[in-house]
Structures are given as C-alpha cells and as structure tokens.
Image (spheres, rainbow, N blue to C red):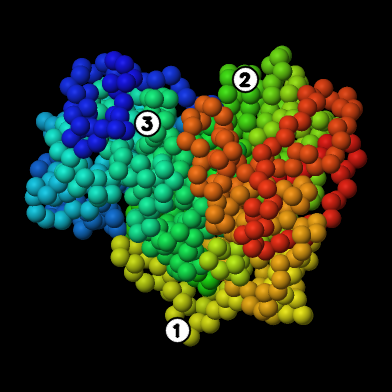
C-alpha cells in the first residue's frame, strides 16, 4: 500500500478522516508497511550502559526492590474479577491494593502497565550484570503475563481490563454510571505489554497487546465524528503512541488505523502553527498526544512531517511559556496563561508525570533531529525534576513538586497511593541509563556526564566515564576497548558552562584540538585501550528570573538547581482531590523574600552574583552576601533534598536600579539562568521567544541555549538540518566557538584539527527586551597545554 493511502491526510477531517481509517482497518493485516527510518540517532540497549554513580545506583536499587516487593496477584485482582464477570468496585474480599488501585478507584489497573514497563527495563539492564536478580524479575514478569493471558482468553472480544467494559460505554454516552479515564489506563496496559515483549522477549505479551489493539480498533472504528470528539475530550493518555508502537511490531493495518483515530488534528493544527492554545488545558492530557504525533512521523516517515512539526512546536511552546527553572510545568495539573509563572507558584506545581512525558518527547525529538537543545533540556529536567522526585531512602516518589516557597515534597506510600506519578516513578528509576549516550552508524554522542560504562558492541568500543558534577567540574573517559578504525566521539558542550571560563579537553594529558559544532566537541581518532579523555566544564552560579516578576529569582550552579532548607516545623499535608498536597499551617512563618542591602540595587546585586552567592570551599553549599539573609539561607542541590521545607524561588526586595550599561556585559533571557557567552557584546547565545524567558534554569527553553526563537520555529523536516532556518530559533547557538583563542598544536594528539561556528542571536534583540544585564566575569587562564572552547 502506498504511503499516500496510509497517511491520514491533514486536509481530511471528521467523517472523511474516519472513512480513511475505516478503509485502512478493512485491509488484511500485514498490508501496511512502515516507512524507512527517519531518526538521525539511536539509543543504546539498556544492557550496554551501566550507571556506576553511587547516588543513582542507590535510587535504582531502592526502586527495583520496591517493585519486586509488590504482589502481582494483588495488582491483578481486578483483572481476574472482570474476567469472571464481576465488578471489582462492588466485590469485597479481592485483596486489592489501596489508593488508585483500590475498589473505589475508577483508574484501577493502570499500575500493572507501569509495573510491567519498569520490570521489563530492570530485567534488561541487569541481564548483563546480575543474572540472579534478572532471573527473579523475569519469573515475576512471566507469571504476570501468563495470568493476563488467561484473563483475556475468558473474553471472546479480547477485552482485558480491571474494570468492566461499561466504563468505556459511559465515556461514549451509551451507559450511565461513573467512569474516569479508561483509555488512559488502556494505554498503560498496552505500553507495558509492548515493553515486556521488547525488553524481556516474552512473545505472549505481544499476543495479548495485539488482541487489545484489535479490540481498540473494533470499538473506535464505530465512532462517528461527533462521538470521536466526545471520547477524545476525555484524557486518553498516549493511545496513539502505543498503537503506533504496536503497528511497528505487528504490521497490522487495523492497529495503524486505530492509532490514526486517536490523533487529535484539531489540537495539532493550531499548535503546529505556533499558536498557544494550551491555557486551561490539563497538562498531562496534552503531552502524550504529541508524543504520539511524533511517533506517527517516526513510524510513517517524511510524508507525516505535519505531525513532527506539531510535536516540535508543542515542545517549544511549553518551554517558552509554561516551564519553571527545574524543567517542570503546570499548576494544579493545568497549563495557565503564558509566562504567568510567579503568579502560579504554590504547593501543587510540576506534576511529575508531566516531566516524565516531556522527557519522553524530548528524547524522541533529539533522536529525530540530533539537535542539542533537546539534550540540554533533558539533562536539566532529568536532574532537577526526575531525580528530585524520589526519596533516596525507600524509592517512593512525588506527585507534585511545589515551586511556592516554604512547602515540601510529599511522597507516595508503598501500598496505599498508587498515584499516576508513582507509576511513572517506577519507570523513571529503572531507566536511568537510557539517555546518557547515543549513536549513529559510526559516531558516539555523549549527552550526560554521569559515572557509567558503555559497551558499544556493534563498533567494538567500550569506555568508562568518571564524573561527579556538581562537586567536580571534570569528566574523565577511559577507553577499555576500541576498533582498529577511527571513531568520532562527540561530547555535548552543556549550555550551563561558565560564561567567561574556558572549556578544556585533553587526550592522554595533552592538548587536543577538536571540532566544535552544533553544541558538541568532537574528537576523531583511532582509539587504543587505556586512552584517557578529560573534559573540564567550568561551573558558576547563575540567576533565573521569572517572566511575570523579574525579581522572583532562583539560583543554578552548573546543571543543578539550588534550594535553601527552611526547616521542618509542622510538615502537615491535606487531601488534594485524589492525592495530597503540602501545607504551611497557621503559625508557621516562612520568609520568602531576600532583601538587598549595603547600598546595592537589585540589578547590581544580580550582576555580581559570583560575589553575592558564595560557595563554601569543598562543598556544594552557597551562602548569601549583601542581603538581610546573610548566612541564614544555605543553598544546596535541590534534587538531593527530601525531608524539609524549601525555597527554590525567592523574591528580591530593594531598589531595582538601572540596567548595567552595555560595557563588557551581556543580557540573558529572564528565567533561563543563562549568562554571557564568550562573544562580543553584539552577540548573545540563546533566545527568549518573545522575551518570555523560557523560564528555565540553564534554560528550560533548551536550558538557555535558546530553544525557541520567537515561537515560530521552522516547519521543515528535521531531515533538512537539525537547527532549521533563520526563522526557527535553532538551538540558540552552541556557544562561543570563536572565543578569541587560537588553534594550538596537537602535541602528539592525533585529533582532527578544525573548528566550526555556531548560530547566534543578536544581542540587540535581547537587550531591547529590557532584561537585566550581567557583568562578564574575568576569563580564567586555561591550563597549560589544554584546548579551550568558549562558553555557550
């Protein structure tokens, strides 16, 4: 069948689009075929990368231990009851778990999907390092799959769910009663089954998923245009996403047709045009839809470029208009008015599921384009949202992460919550190794600086990375095995590197010239076992300002957001619909301001932040100077905080003062935490959209690399270049490639000697926004014999 027939054309809508879907579904399974791959980069298998960082290892082991402690029979009890014709909500004695898996819950059954996804990934990553534990995990997976198969076999239609099918009838208006988001839960179940097949190799899991795909098609293909709108008006997770995944595995045309039915073009069209129609919408309802849109492009190829554009523009809009310094978004689970972020700071910000899904979207966009802005955002959000959402003592995870000052993190309970974010939390910490490294056919891309090992078996390259950011500014890579031919290693140059300090790279202790292009430092050579590459990535404190209140600030050091502990007095919670929220009870006094004194204006204080937020030697702890809070607020990495009240944002009080004159200074987008690049004052790396600030720490707008431009990113295919045209905003520049340094001899290091310039945005465009200016710090002298690269 031609791709033209396969695609649900953008010009078709309503009944016409449905007719195309029906036509597709009528074809014999196997008649459809996926397009050639459009992804520029691929991930490594989970058993090819191992995280060796002790903090990460502890969290992963705690999470796996928790998941293994769960009784699959209790997770399956609702499915078993339905297969026997019972309603678990009215059947006492089933020994269900509590919370969202309890008898009262209308979302019962979602956890089994997360459980399967997490267990499958844990099995895969441990299969090469811990045969005993991986075998124990496989035993539980196989038992669970066997039980699900028996429950599905009891249904002539292939229905498999932990609530009666009437829940779907209620959504369609065909029955009375209660329902919540049954298609959301169905997405989790199908996705979990697919993960088991792909990571653990259980063919029965794919058989079950395929029958559920048939059931989903048989039901959805009966909808007319009005009913389709009605059903898609209720949260349905990533049904399009999982059905595209299923189609790639089964090649069944009805699975593809069902995926198309869940593509919401009425939403994709305005977003693809750069229009922010998100205010008032439930955030985590929207994000998976665009993951599915991107998956349509990945599955069917260039003919579906509209769906790529929709996903890319959505990512841009969320970062530009709705994202906090940690990379998270939302208040009370919803998007609100663009760039009104200080106004929405409270105790119910940043639903963790949102960050899970934004990272999934970012990872897919990175693989499709190779654009470093997605890797920048991924690191920012992974550290400051995902690693911030877990209790390192027991593996329990958060629902919300307050941006309001004085609140605290609330974690789920092992058997009594099972919130959606507990489910995605199971997955988050069983895949900590999945985005450190990427590759194409020949080259390696190092995206994250975390102690780990890589075994690229297809190329015969193995290496060990030793990093300890933000304690140390160095990353060491030691080659353990290498092929005879040359291999190019591309090291991401983070957007957070200090603005006026040199990035250095050495090979075996000797200076090494390397290409700098598109946000990566590239070293090409024939490697030998024992070769060592050392990167020095200098860090500094940066200030992130919110767009609706430039005096509401957060502090960032290197890749980590800082927060100050505010005590543990009366850390009480109260219900928040189906979850919980932290409170500040009457009588608990929280000071959420920092007064600037000693005759210094706010803008002067910020411009001299390196002397006003001072690091305690030998620690990652910072204290204030020239304020009314000197030595009383101690700022440390927020992701490690889990047992006290905190403040990320504080409101600065005092005299604002004039902007610092443009004399050796540069102006950052507010909220990005980005400071000066090593460029003249006529240039600046990074862009703010319409002065929005991308509200990110090292930039939630692609971590200060200017992910968004003016919000009118080019709609061309990513295959035509990862950074797009001049109207796109590109990656905001990958840094000061022309930093005034001169090429040095290789001193015996046989690296490629070349340099490449990067796109930049004019300083005048930023300065005209009236943003606060920053003093350039003095350039530190580079170590003898080191190749230096300007800050991004």
Q: Residue at x 29, y 33 (%)?
A: 11
Q: Position of residue 67 (x, y in %)?
A: 40, 46
Q: CA distance from mark 3 to mark 1?
A: 51 Å
Q: Quadrant of the N terminus?
A: top left
Left or right of 562: which side holds 780? right
- Vertical placement of residue 407 versus 640, above or below: below
Left or right of 531: which side holds 468? left
The quadrant in which residue 769 appears is bottom right
Q: Residue at x 54, y 57 (%)?
A: 692
Q: Give the mark nearer the N terminus: 3 vs 1.
A: 3
Q: Quadrant of the C terminus?
A: top right
What numbered label is drawn on residue 296?
3
| Along the line of sight, the residue nearer the viewer: 206 or 141 | 206
Q: Give the mark nearer the N terminus: 3 vs 2.
A: 3
Q: Position of residue 541 (x, y in %)?
A: 71, 59
Q: Residue at x 64, y 62 (%)?
A: 771
Reading the image, the residue beneath label 2 is 442
Q: Classify 10 Å Cα crowding around label 1: few (below 14), some (14-19), many (20 and above).
A: few
Q: Classify 10 Å Cα crowding around label 2: few (below 14), some (14-19), many (20 and above).
A: few
| Along the line of sight, the residue nearer the viewer: 58 or 49 | 49
Q: Position of residue 333 (x, y in %)?
A: 38, 59
Q: CA distance from mark 3 to mark 2?
A: 27 Å
Dot 1 falls on a residue whose secondary structure is: loop
Reading the image, the residue beneath label 1 is 586
- Vertical placement of residue 769 versus 362, above or below: below
């Amino acid at each position: 069948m031609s791709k033209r027939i396969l695609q649900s054309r953008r010009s078709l809508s309503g009944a016409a689009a449905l007719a195309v879907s029906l036509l597709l579904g009528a074809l014999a399974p196997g008649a459809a075929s996926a397009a050639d791959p459009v992804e520029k980069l691929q991930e490594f298998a989970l058993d090819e990368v191992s995280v060796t960082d002790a903090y990460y290892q502890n969290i992963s082991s705690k999470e796996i231990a928790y998941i293994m402690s769960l009784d699959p029979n209790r997770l399956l009890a609702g499915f078993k009851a339905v297969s026997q014709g019972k309603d678990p909500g009215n059947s006492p004695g089933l020994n269900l778990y509590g919370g969202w898996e309890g008898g009262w819950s209308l979302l019962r059954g979602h956890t089994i999907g997360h459980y399967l996804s997490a267990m499958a990934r844990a099995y895969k990553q441990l299969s090469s390092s811990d045969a005993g534990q991986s075998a124990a995990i496989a035993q539980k997976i196989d038992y669970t799959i066997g039980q699900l198969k028996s429950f599905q076999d009891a249904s002539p239609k292939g229905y498999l769910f932990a609530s009666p099918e009437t829940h779907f009838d209620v959504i369609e208006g065909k029955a009375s009663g209660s329902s919540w988001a049954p298609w959301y839960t169905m997405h989790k179940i199908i996705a979990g089954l697919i993960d088991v097949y792909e990571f653990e190799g259980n063919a029965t899991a794919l058989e079950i998923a395929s029958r559920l795909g048939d059931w989903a098609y048989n039901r959805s293909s009966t909808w007319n245009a009005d009913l389709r709108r009605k059903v898609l008006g209720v949260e349905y997770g990533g049904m399009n996403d999982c059905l595209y995944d299923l189609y790639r595995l089964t090649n069944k045309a009805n699975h593809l047709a069902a995926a198309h039915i869940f593509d919401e073009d009425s939403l994709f069209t305005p977003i693809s045009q750069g229009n922010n129609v998100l205010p008032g919408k439930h955030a985590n309802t929207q994000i998976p839809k665009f993951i599915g849109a991107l998956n349509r492009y990945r599955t069917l190829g260039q003919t579906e470029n509209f769906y790529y554009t929709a996903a890319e523009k959505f990512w841009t809009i969320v970062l530009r208009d709705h994202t906090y310094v940690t990379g998270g978004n939302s208040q009370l689970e919803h998007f609100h008015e663009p760039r009104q972020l200080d106004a929405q700071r409270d105790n119910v910000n940043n639903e963790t599921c949102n960050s899970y899904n934004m990272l999934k979207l970012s990872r897919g966009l990175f693989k499709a384009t190779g654009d470093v802005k997605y890797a920048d955002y991924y690191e920012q959000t992974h550290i400051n949202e995902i690693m911030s959402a877990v209790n390192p003592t027991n593996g329990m995870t958060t629902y919300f992460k307050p941006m309001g000052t004085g609140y605290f993190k609330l974690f789920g309970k092992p058997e009594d919550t099972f919130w959606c974010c507990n489910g995605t939390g199971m997955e988050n910490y069983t895949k900590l190794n999945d985005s450190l490294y990427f590759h194409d056919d020949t080259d390696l891309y190092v995206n994250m600086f975390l102690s780990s090992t890589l075994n690229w078996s297809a190329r015969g390259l193995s290496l060990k990375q030793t990093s300890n950011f933000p304690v140390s500014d160095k990353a060491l890579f030691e080659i353990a095995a290498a092929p005879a031919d040359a291999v190019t290693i591309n090291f991401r140059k983070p957007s957070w590197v200090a603005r006026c300090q040199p990035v250095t790279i050495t090979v075996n202790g000797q200076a090494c010239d390397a290409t700098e292009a598109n946000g990566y430092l590239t070293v090409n050579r024939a490697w030998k076992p024992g070769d060592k590459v050392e990167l020095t990535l200098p860090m500094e404190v940066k200030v992130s300002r919110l767009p609706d209140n430039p005096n509401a600030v957060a502090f960032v050091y290197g890749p980590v957001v800082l927060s100050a502990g505010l005590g543990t007095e009366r850390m009480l919670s109260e219900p928040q619909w189906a979850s919980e929220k932290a409170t500040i009870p009457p009588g608990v006094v929280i000071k959420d301001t920092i007064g600037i004194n000693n005759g210094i204006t706010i803008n002067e204080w910020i411009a001299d932040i390196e002397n006003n937020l001072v690091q305690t030697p030998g620690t990652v702890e910072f204290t204030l100077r020239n304020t009314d809070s000197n030595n009383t607020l101690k700022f440390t990495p927020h992701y490690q905080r889990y047992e006290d009240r905190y403040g990320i944002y504080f409101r600065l009080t005092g005299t604002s003062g004039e902007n610092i004159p443009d004399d050796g200074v540069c102006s950052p987008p507010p909220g990005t935490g980005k400071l000066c690049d090593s460029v003249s004052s006529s240039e600046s790396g990074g862009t703010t959209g319409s002065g929005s600030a991308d509200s990110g720490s090292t930039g939630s707008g692609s971590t200060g690399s200017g992910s968004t431009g003016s919000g009118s990113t080019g709609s061309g295919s990513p295959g035509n270049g990862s950074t797009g045209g001049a109207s796109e905003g590109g990656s905001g520049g990958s840094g000061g490639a022309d930093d005034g340094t001169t090429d040095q001899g290789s001193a015996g290091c046989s690296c490629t000697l070349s340099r490449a310039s990067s796109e930049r945005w004019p300083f005048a465009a930023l300065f005209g926004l009236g943003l606060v200016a920053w003093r350039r710090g003095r350039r530190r002298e580079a170590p003898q014999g080191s190749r230096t690269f300007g800050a991004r």
